[in-house]
Amino acid sequence: MNEPEPIPNAEELEFKPAFIERYSKLTDWAQFKKYSLSFLRRSIRINTLLTPVVETKKSIEAKGWILKPIPWCKESFWIDNPDRRDVGNLLEHHLGKIYVQEAASMIPPLILNPQPGDVVLDMCAAPGSKTTQMAAMMQNQGLLVANDFKGQRLQSLGINLQRSGVTNVLISLMHGKRFYQFQFDKILLDAPCSGTGTIRKSLKTIRIWNPLTISKLARQQKELIKNAFENLRPGGEMVYSTCSDEPEEDEGVVDYLLQTFSNAKIVPTHLKGLKISPPVLEFDGVIYDASLKHTLRIWPQDNDTEGFFVAKIKKT
């Protein structure tokens, strides 16, 4: 893994003392800071609903772009060009043949692994990167309900679904906690979070970070994960994920689910080529369920990506 390219003047940004203290306990602070203040590598996922991977890869490389495979997702590549950065201006993007998607963001759908014919819920779907990825995995077969809470966010979701040639999706507008007595085969809950794993994409996260906000978000996430589990059929599986590195939003939320439902079980997960760090099983005097050792905690410095947390849960 090459050294990341620092964001100019990012070193001048000041982290709050409480943030430094917390993250020094959680991980290697120097490495976390270095990667969080570096440019995020651009990555794309080739949309297999419209064209084969080989065909699209060849057409992009013919324009001078360098594609490097992402180990854990066979349809995806890191993309670079010595003279350009405007991946979004590629014709392949406008035609829906590729989706500009962060490499770690591809992990939750891969872990959920929806199949053709499944009935699937994407509870917090907009703008649609994971929705379109799951639709491709399902080969446009079965039903994929793409839900979001804010009507304005559905605009980008609808555009991305249409551009990607997705035909098996039903869009809904409601709060995730309003779903009631559905029986989904699989559910993705990529929950709204503090985004501390995405500092390198949004430096303002450093300024607005607040422990009280973390606590408020964790309460909302617990409502969502509880309702998602209640709408999962017996034998069904769900994935809970965030782009947060906060234990309260990650292991703490899944621990709450395990304590609430005796039939909720963690499914051990693994993706070839993905480097992970040990999950947090104890923090600030709080001890989490030992089965959380089977979840995925990904720091920015692990794979030079965003930070992510992913847990797969089965309803027994």
Image: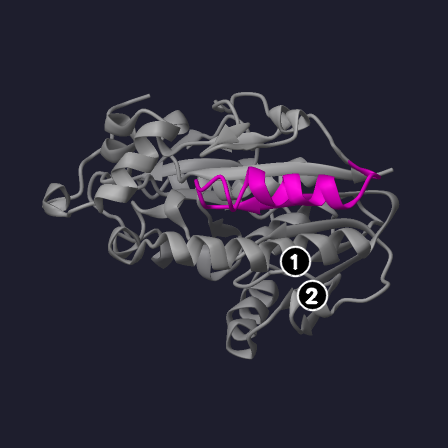
Name the kind of residue labelled 1 in the image.
Answer: Leu
Residue 218 appears in the picture as rendered:
yes
The crowd level at tag 1 (other Cα within 10 Å; few <14, some 14-19, many 20+) is many
Q: Nearer the viewer, residue 245 or 287?
A: 287
Q: Is residue 245 magenta?
A: yes
**SS assignment at label 2:** helix
Magenta part of the protein: which range? Answer: 238-264
* Quarter of the image where the N terminus is located: top left
| Picture colour scheme | one colour
Name the kind of residue labelled 2 in the image.
Answer: Lys
Residue 238 appears in the picture as rendered:
no
Q: Which residue is drawn at 30% across and 54% down?
A: 205
Are the residues at dot 2 and dot 1 in contact (C-beta closer than 8 Å)? Answer: yes
Q: Residue at x 69, y 72 (%)?
A: 172
The picture places residue 308, in percent across and down from the top left corner, at 48, 39
The picture places residue 171, in percent across and down from the top left corner, at 69, 70
Q: Nearer the viewer, residue 133 or 83?
A: 133
According to the picture, the residue beneath numbered tag 1 turns out to be 224
Q: Which residue is drawn at 52% across and 38% down?
A: 309
The crowd level at tag 2 (other Cα within 10 Å; few <14, some 14-19, many 20+) is some
> Residue farthest to the bottom?
151
309 lies left or right of 8? right
294 lies left or right of 36? right
According to the picture, the residue beneath numbered tag 2 turns out to be 177
Q: How far is mark 2 from mark 1, CA to CA?
A: 5 Å
Query: In this rendering, is residue 166 above or below 189?
Result: below
Query: In this rendering, is residue 26 above or below 40?
Result: above
Q: Is residue 58 magenta?
A: no
Q: Which badge, 2 or 1, is on the more N-terminal residue?
A: 2
> Residue farthest to the front?
285
